Image (spheres, grey):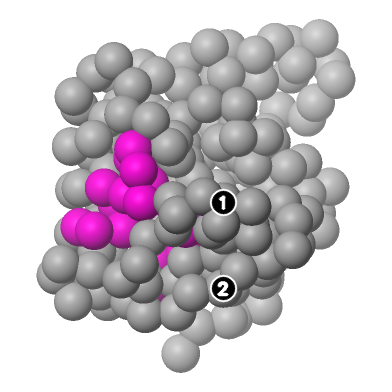
Amino acid sequence: MTLPRSVCVFCGSNFGTDPAYAQAARDLGQILAKKKVKLVFGGGNVGLMGEVARATHNLGGHVTSIVPKAIAQMELQFDEADEAIVTDNMHDRKGRMFARSDAFVALPGGIGTLEEVIEVLSWAYLAFHSKPIVLVNINNYWDPLLHLMKHLVDHEFARPQLLGSVTGNDVLLVADNADQVLPVIEAALAYRYADNLMAPAFS
């Protein structure tokens, strides 16, 4: 199977109530570094954002930080990124994160994380892109969102392929922990290549 060249990680700028969230962020960062998959993230140095970036960087992984000017001016930017991009606003930030990523992964987070996930999810649902989107459902954190997605399907406001199994053409995929993230992405890419659902983008 083919690994993505880069993965965009959405996650919280806080640590949350469960220490497992921060551990998952560190685990994911280490996995990306070991597999030589570039990390693209929102540029913060605090909370889960800081944890995943430091874990990637500390093992020699490539980190691309994309941060809005307002956050950079608050001195909340991760300073050890291999590539640091400062954008004028949040819209430009999200556009650049999308353009530089081959897949999207959401660790636990708040309103900002949820908004980022929903945006790339809606684009995928409308077939504007075929990049895998994976929720890392640490200790069932994302269950309420998954229940809402099922509610949309049950009431016929969304097609059944909105979410489902790990493989196949489901728009929203789920991993229970950091170790499952890249295998889930690889399985999705293999299925989509086989059915010509997306053009090969990786070397």
Give the amino acid at mark 1. Ile
Q: Secondary structure at mark 2?
A: strand
Q: Secondary structure at mark 1?
A: helix
Rendering coords of residue 96 (x, y %): 67, 68
The residue tagged 2 is: 85
Query: In the image, is 167 to the left or to the right of 171?
Result: left
Can residue 128 be seen here? The reply is: yes
Query: In the image, is 123 to the left or to the right of 175?
Result: right
Disc 1/disc 2 C-alpha distance (Å): 12 Å
Image quadrant where residue 62 sits: bottom left
Above or below, comparing residue 60 to residue 130 in the picture = below
The residue sitting at 81% across, 9% down in the picture is 155
Q: Earlier in the sequence, mark 1 or mark 2?
A: 1
The residue sitting at 53% across, 12% down in the picture is 144
Can residue 190 be seen here? The reply is: no
The residue tagged 1 is: 71
The label number, if any, that marks residue 109 in the structure image: none
Q: Is residue 48 magenta?
A: yes
The residue sitting at 36% across, 72% down in the picture is 81
Above or below, comparing residue 187 to residue 111 in the picture = below
Mark 2 Cα within 10 Å, few/some/many (few <14, many 20+)?
some
User: For the magenta stretch, what is the residue range?
Assistant: 38-55
